Image (cartoon, rainbow, N blue to C red):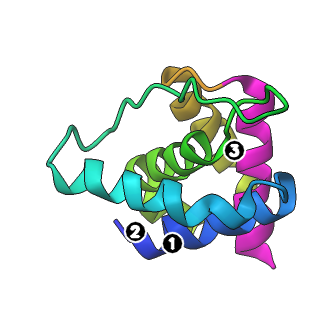
Amino acid sequence: MNMDKVKEYSKKFMEKEYPDEAPYHHIAWEIFQEVVKKGENANLDLEPPAVRDEGGDTIMAPMVIQAFHTLFFELGEEIESSEDSASLKPLMMEVLSKCKFSSEFSKKIIDFILEHNNG
């Protein structure tokens, strides 16, 4: 799996969807890499953080990184080679659903990947 792709997609997604938090993506990425280096389960099951900012919003970067990692780990080859987004989208939804990502969040992630791959 190409971790550079996970980093690139998650960073661009953060810039688009969570611009206030995007400047801190690198911190979440460093923590994520440490977890991966420790040899944790390849299909990481990280709990979304309970960390809150001053406004009380959930910090999204770790969840965004985990979603991209999950999709590229499970379906990386299909994502890279597929030109048929109609058949790929349900597979991606199934993978994220199994990992307990909300359907609204999953749709945003999937649409971003499909947009990015076609653009």
Q: Mark 3 highlights which residue?
A: 89
Q: Mark 1 highlights which residue?
A: 5
Is residue 119 shown above or below 91? below
Alpha-carbon span between mark 2 and mark 3: 21 Å
Residue type indicated by callout 3: Lys
Q: What range of the chain is rendered magenta?
A: 102-119
Which quarter shows the C terminus? bottom right
Residue type indicated by callout 1: Lys
Which quarter shows the N terminus? bottom left
Q: Is residue 112 magenta?
A: yes
Left or right: 18 with respect to 39?
right
**Dot 2: element:** helix
Left or right: 17 with respect to 94?
right
Q: Mark 2 highlights which residue?
A: 3
Left or right: 12 with respect to 42?
right
Residue 8 rendering spot, x and y as whole percentages: 59, 73
- Camera sees residue 83: no
Q: Count neighbours of disc 3 (C-alpha within 10 A) and say few if under 14, some if 14 to 19, many if 20 or more.
A: some
Which residue is at the front of the view, 116 or 27? 27
Residue 44 rendering spot, x and y as whole percentages: 34, 37
Q: Circles 2 and 1: CB distance less than 8 Å?
A: yes
